[in-house]
């Protein structure tokens, strides 16, 4: 049985960065990556970007590491193989081809899967999910002949695919369950700004609605909504959330919730097992909460810190996460924890009328008030300063007026 | 033609003479800001700009460029030859 000092399950940016970090500190230890997709590291974020989809930049620009890189760095790559069982007592991983690998130290960075529709006819041809490179290839091919498309869900996938569908000349309707786009993560004013951009781009939006039936023989021909509205379409893109597949971890003793639970060092509850990337539900010491975050930058930073801790360091993960997107003439950013429940103060910067609107979300700790997060529409230039303010836990209790002044430079608060 | 924005690097002990941002490729993933927030920043179009081309050493600058998921950061040597991406 092959044995590795460092075994990494998951070949996305979290796993790859961990391997790269380990190799940069230890040139001789055995390192292997197991990846269920057959591909070397590619840019998952490119998959939903119009200029990639529409062939404006070459397909090959999706590759971030080629096979040579793994060889040169002496990292064994098991592509196209899935981990099907973790036997933590014997420190062994069983793969889908029945082979087994032993580990001294294990990193689980398996990411998340796209949630699939599960009701009659949801297996018709023409229903797509966007998560893997293969998913991307299939959709790229489908948009060449599609005439009418529907996107399901009011989040990043819908926003970005609506943009690219429109650019591809496809008549597009967006169906969302909520009252406005991105409820409740955004306030209504921000949501309406995004809807304004979508509608200006020619995209129709149907609110408070869900599909109850799919019509078609082998291919999708139409959907019927709960209020019996029928919409013809030959393509449906579903962005209805993600989940973690834990079947292979059954009986392993690993503690899971929505993700795999980890402490601030990204260490799981089993000996010599770490977790990184979207699958990690980890203790965030800046927010003092256990959270799960799904984005590229976070996964990369996770991989780096997990890699360092696997080789014997003890560094807590301390990073203010953020995610941005743009399209249809609008830019959107989420920084830190953007929940705005009653215990938090929300300060507005700019306004929808000015087409530049931000919300700074502040945790009210009585005497102290600290910035926890922000949402920014057409104000991405403030992202870095806000991330810094969150990271430094700066008391802004006597600065609330200033924070609401559109012209006030947030950088001046960073000490 | 790509929409390139160029920044000269004058740091004497650096092998890099120029940083360029391909604004068509940049999607504002901001991984470069995570690596080196004193060098890079986003503008309101969600594209990266260089605020201080001389702020960090070569290793950090290269790590920031390598972290970009769309390879939108280009690095050139002092003679103008592109070094990254290769």
Image: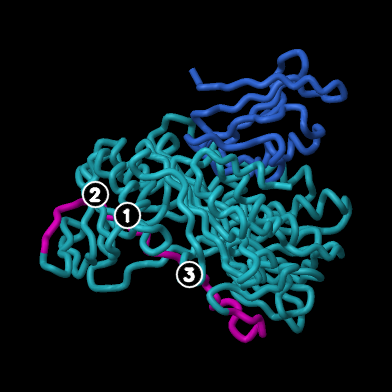
Label whose residue precedes the other's in the sequence (1 or 2): 2
Give residue A85's quadrant in the image.
bottom right
Residue A185 locus on image (x, y percent): 43, 61
- Find disc 2 in the rendering and name its residue: A149
Label for residue A243?
Answer: 3
Residue at left 69%, top 26%? B75
Classed neighbour count for the residue bearing mark 3: other residues with Cα under 10 Å, few (<14), some (14–19), many (≥20): some
Indicate the quadrant where residue A111 lies: bottom right
Regarding residue A225, the answer to whether it shows in the image is yes
Q: Residues within 10 Å of mark 1 (few under 14, many from 20)?
A: many
Residues under labels 1 and 3: Cα distance? 17 Å
The disc at residue A237 is 1
Whether A351 is drawn above or below B3: the answer is below
Distance CA(mark 2)–CA(mark 3): 25 Å
Taking the spot 70% from the left edge, 52% from the top edge, the residue there is A17
Subunit under mark 3: A
Indicate the colour of chain B.
Answer: blue
Residue at (70% x, 34% y) in the render: B39
Quadrant occupied by the C terminus of chain B: top right
Residue B15, percent across and down? 81, 23
A230 in the magenta segment: yes
Q: Which chain is cyan?
A: A
Chain containing the residue with disc 2: A
Q: Are marks 1 and 3 in contact (CB under 8 Å)?
A: no
Please report whichever mark, 1 or 3, sits nearer to the chain's N-terminal start: 1
Give the structural element (helix, strand or loop) at label 1.
strand
């Amino acid at each position: 049985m092959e044995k590795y000092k460092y075994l990494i399950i998951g070949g996305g940016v979290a796993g790859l960065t961990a391997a790269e970090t380990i190799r940069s500190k230890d040139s001789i230890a055995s390192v292997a990556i197991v990846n269920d997709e057959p591909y070397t590291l590619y840019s998952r974020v490119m998959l939903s970007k119009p200029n990639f989809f529409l062939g404006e930049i070459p397909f090959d620009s999706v590759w971030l590491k080629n096979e040579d890189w793994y060889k040169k760095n002496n990292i064994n790559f098991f592509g196209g193989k899935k981990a099907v069982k973790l036997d933590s007592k014997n420190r062994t991983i069983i793969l889908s081809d029945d082979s087994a690998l032993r580990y001294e130290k294990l990193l689980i960075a398996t990411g998340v899967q796209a949630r699939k529709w599960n009701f009659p006819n949801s297996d018709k041809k023409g229903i797509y999910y966007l998560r893997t490179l293969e998913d991307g290839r299939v959709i790229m091919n489908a948009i060449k002949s599609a005439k009418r498309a529907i996107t399901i869900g009011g989040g990043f996938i819908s926003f970005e695919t609506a943009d690219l569908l429109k650019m591809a000349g496809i008549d597009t309707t967006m169906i969302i369950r909520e009252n406005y786009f991105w409820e409740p993560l955004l306030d209504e004013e921000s949501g309406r700004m995004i809807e304004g951009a979508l509608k200006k781009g020619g995209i129709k939006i149907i609110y408070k609605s869900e599909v109850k039936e799919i019509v078609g023989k082998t291919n999708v021909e139409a959907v019927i909504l709960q209020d019996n509205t029928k919409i013809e379409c030959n393509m449906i893109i579903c962005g209805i959330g993600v989940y973690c597949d834990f079947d292979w971890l059954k009986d392993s003793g690993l503690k899971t919730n929505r993700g795999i639970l980890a402490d601030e060092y990204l260490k799981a509850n089993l000996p010599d097992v770490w977790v990184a990337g979207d699958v990690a539900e980890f203790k965030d010491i800046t927010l003092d909460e256990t959270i799960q975050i799904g984005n590229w930058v976070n996964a990369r930073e996770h991989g780096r810190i997990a890699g360092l801790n696997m080789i014997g360091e003890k560094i807590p993960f301390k990073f203010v996460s953020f995610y941005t997107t743009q399209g249809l003439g609008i830019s959107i950013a989420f920084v830190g924890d953007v929940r705005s429940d009653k215990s938090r103060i929300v300060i507005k910067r700019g306004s929808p009328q000015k087409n530049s609107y931000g919300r700074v979300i502040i945790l009210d700790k009585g005497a102290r008030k600290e910035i926890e997060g922000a949402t920014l529409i057409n104000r991405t230039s403030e992202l870095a300063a806000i991330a810094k303010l969150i990271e430094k836990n700066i008391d802004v209790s006597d600065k609330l007026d200033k924070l609401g002044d559109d012209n006030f430079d947030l950088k001046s608060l960073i000490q | 033609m790509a929409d390139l924005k160029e920044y000269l690097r004058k740091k004497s002990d650096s092998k890099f003479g120029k940083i360029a941002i391909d604004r068509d490729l940049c999607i504002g993933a901001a991984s470069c800001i995570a690596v080196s927030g004193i060098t890079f920043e986003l503008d309101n179009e969600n594209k990266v700009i260089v605020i201080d081309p001389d702020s960090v050493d070569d290793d950090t600058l290269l790590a920031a460029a390598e972290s970009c998921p769309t390879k939108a950061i280009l690095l050139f040597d002092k003679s103008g030859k592109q070094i990254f991406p290769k």
